[in-house]
Amino acid sequence: MVARRRVNVKRNVRRVFPVRLFILLTIVAAFALSYLWLCGRCQALARDLKRGEDRLAELRRRRLNEDYKWSNLRTHKPVRDALAAFRIEMDWPGKDRVVYLTRSMDLADLPSAPGPQFAQTRGRERRE
């Protein structure tokens, strides 16, 4: 007769992974992933903010540059040079051509121009 093999029961017993530990590890992993996502989002927002601030600084610098150019163009000498370059003879308007506006005036009270106005150049006329 053949001897029966005894099965060692202790070797076949599997240990079940604890459910509480699994839940705890899942929660910790979820918090870790949320933290990493939040850090990445904050860095992306910081990059966008930096780009916006750089753009704003550039636009402010360009605006100041244009203000400087405009203030130089508005002075009398460049205006007179430009008028001379295009052969436009121009003089300051007389007191009868200047209209002073106050807040109490209506548009109906303002005098209107009698007809079309012309700018004269040497030898020809231009209509405005």
Image (cartoon, rainbow, N blue to C red):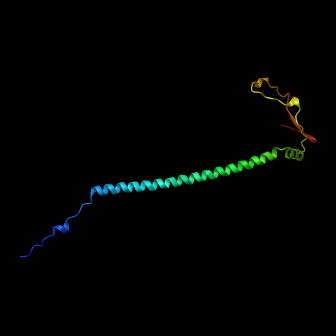
Q: How many tags in the picture?
A: 0
In the picture shown, does residue 88 fall above or below 29?
above
Residue 40, how many percent across, how many down? Answer: 49, 55
Q: Residue at x 24, y 60 (%)?
A: 16
The residue positioned 39% from the left and 54% from the top of the image is: 30
Q: Position of residue 50 (x, y in %)?
A: 59, 53
The residue lying furthest to the bottom in this view is: 1
In this rendering, position of residue 107 left or right of residue 46: right
Task: Tell me if 2 is positioned left or right of 117 in this view.
Answer: left
Horizontal relation, residue 65 to residue 49: left or right = right
Instruction: Report the side of 83 relative to 9 (left or right).
Output: right
The vertical placement of 103 against 41, above or below, is above
Percent coordinates x, y for residue 104 in the rendering: 75, 24
Q: Quadrant of the C terminus?
A: top right
Residue, far top: 109
Give the quadrant of residue 102.
top right
Seen from this angle, which residue lies furthest left? 1
Residue at far right of view: 123
Q: Quadrant of the N terminus?
A: bottom left
Q: Residue at x 52, y 55 (%)?
A: 43
Q: Nearer the viewer, residue 83 or 117?
A: 83
Question: Residue 126's spot in the image, x, y percent?
Answer: 87, 39
Front one among 117 and 32? 32
